[in-house]
Image: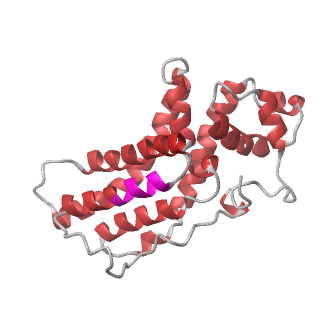
Amino acid sequence: MTAQHRIDSTAPHHSKTRLLNAALHVIRAQGYSATTVDDICLEAGVTKGSFFHHFKSKDDLALAAVAHWRDMTEGIFAAAPYHQIQDPLDRLLGYLDFRVALLTGELPDYTCLLGTLVQETYSTHPILRAGCDQALTSHIAALTPDVSAAKALYAPTAPWTPESAATFMQAVLQGAFIFAKARQGPGVIVECIEHLRRYLQMLFHQPHPEETAPRTTSIAEPYELSPADL
């Protein structure tokens, strides 16, 4: 886990927050079934007594971790620089650039807790599945206004809905995370995001620029999470 993603051990944090952040990392690294309460306590640097003071069970912690992930990621994306771009299509492309900039560190640092959890628990833990669905849907809802504005500007008569396009964007990303785990690296995510970029430009009837053309937004500079983000 890289320094920007790991909680700063010298900063004051309550044991509950340390447990939640430990869950985000350990579950993404090992999967939910393979993760034990002992693993999470070890990562958080707290005792099992502290764990059971805050949570009734691993499932209880996982549900709280989903809410913690949702709050954390909503803050990160709300503060992202692409929101300053005026054109709605360019904002969507800036969102993709920001997604690429987040691909730093090891696999557990940039893959999605929600996708990891729901793949394992969709049929066995209905409360966790519902929590993951709500968090994924919330992110789709945050993207939909920009898709809607771009549609009104560039494809007002198109038969698809902004919600369906925003959902497709997330489906591409979640699928790319699975391939990244299979291939042990982020390269496939970058390739999928570039194809998604081309798809959006075709969807909104905009020509794809030459690969050598200057870009208005950059995907080269990584976005570093500070302790304040967490």
Residue extending furthest toward the left: 157
Quadrant in the rendering for residue 171: top left
Above or below for 132 versus 156? above
Please give left or right for residue 51 compared with residue 159 in the image. right
For the point 35% across and 50% down, the residue is 169
What sort of colour scheme is used for the picture?
secondary structure
Q: How far from the left and from the top, in percent, is residue 79?
A: 54, 66
The majority secondary structure of the magenta stretch comes to helix
Q: Is 144 part of what is drawn in magenta?
A: no
For the point 66% across and 40% down, the residue is 29
Looking at the rendering, the stretch of residues picked out in magenta corresponds to 187-194
Q: How far from the left and from the top, in percent, is residue 101?
A: 52, 64
Residue extending furthest toward the front: 183
Residue extending furthest toward the top: 124
Q: How far from the left and from the top, in percent, is residue 186?
A: 52, 53
Quadrant in the rendering for residue 36: top right
The quarter of the picture where the C terminus appears is bottom right
Above or below for 192 versus 93? above
Q: How far from the left and from the top, in percent, is residue 42?
A: 84, 37
The image shows a total of numbered marks equal to 0
Foreground residue, 188 or 125?
Answer: 188
Residue extending furthest toward the bottom: 214
Above or below for 56 versus 154? above
Foreground residue, 155 or 108?
Answer: 108
For the point 89% across and 34% down, the residue is 47
Q: Is 190 part of what is drawn in magenta?
A: yes
For the point 65% across and 32% down, the residue is 62
